[in-house]
Image: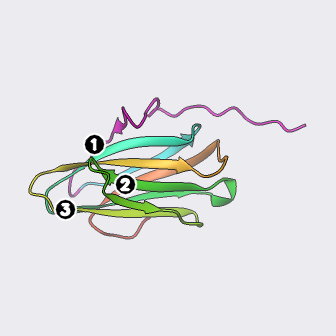
Amino acid sequence: VAVRKACVDDAYEPATEAAPYALSYSAGSEISQQSHAMCHKSDFFTISVDAAASATVCLAFTHSAGDIDLSVTDSAGAGSVSLGTSDTEKVVVTNSDGDAKTYTIKAFAKSGTVNSSYTLSVLDGSVACP
């Protein structure tokens, strides 16, 4: 008999693709949020990146507990996806527009991964993940 521990949503739920959780991020700042729970197949967040600025988005998790991947896209769907096989996923976005731009961050589970926890970090510029 297999017994699974119930997954408890984190404080950022319910966040959907239509209504993502807005993170307070600005150039020169950093966000590091621990203890996100992957109770559903995807978690959604948004950040605003200033004109002519870059941001690095990182996910850190224990890959052996389940694979989590990362995508960061703008409203037109342009952006990047990280489909790694390690304990970290990383996407760098650069806003070359003349105005601030909103990006949607999607942390998503691969093939049946549930009840995994992860840390989400948003860093100023194109830098290494913690």
Closer to the N terminus: mark 2 or mark 1? 1
Number of numbered discs present? 3
Identity, as a three-letter code, of the amino acid under mark 3: Ala
Label 2 Cα neighbours within 10 Å, binned few <14 / some 14-19 / many ≥20: many
Q: Disc 3 to disc 1, how far (Cα)?
A: 16 Å
Lateral position of residue 98 relative to residue 103, left or right: left
What element does badge 3 sit on? strand
> Measured along the vertical axis of the image, is residue 118 above or below residue 125?
above
Residue highlighted by disc 3: 53
Name the kind of residue labelled 1 in the image: Ser
Q: Is residue 115 left or right of residue 98?
A: right
Q: Position of residue 115 (x, y in %)?
A: 64, 41
Label annotation for residue 36: none
Residue designated by label 1: 24
| Foreground pick, 35 / 66 | 66
User: Is 130 colored magenta in this rendering?
Assistant: no
Residue at the extreme top of the image, as rendered: 14
Q: Amino acid at mark 2?
A: Val
Q: Residue at x 29, y 47 (%)?
A: 47
User: On the rendered structure, is 120 left or right of 75?
Assistant: right
SS at circle 2? strand
Residue 106 in the figure: left or right of residue 27: right
Q: Residue at x 59, y 37 (%)?
A: 39
Residue 19 among those drawn in magenta = yes
Which stretch appears magenta?
Answer: 1-28
Residue assigned mark 2: 72
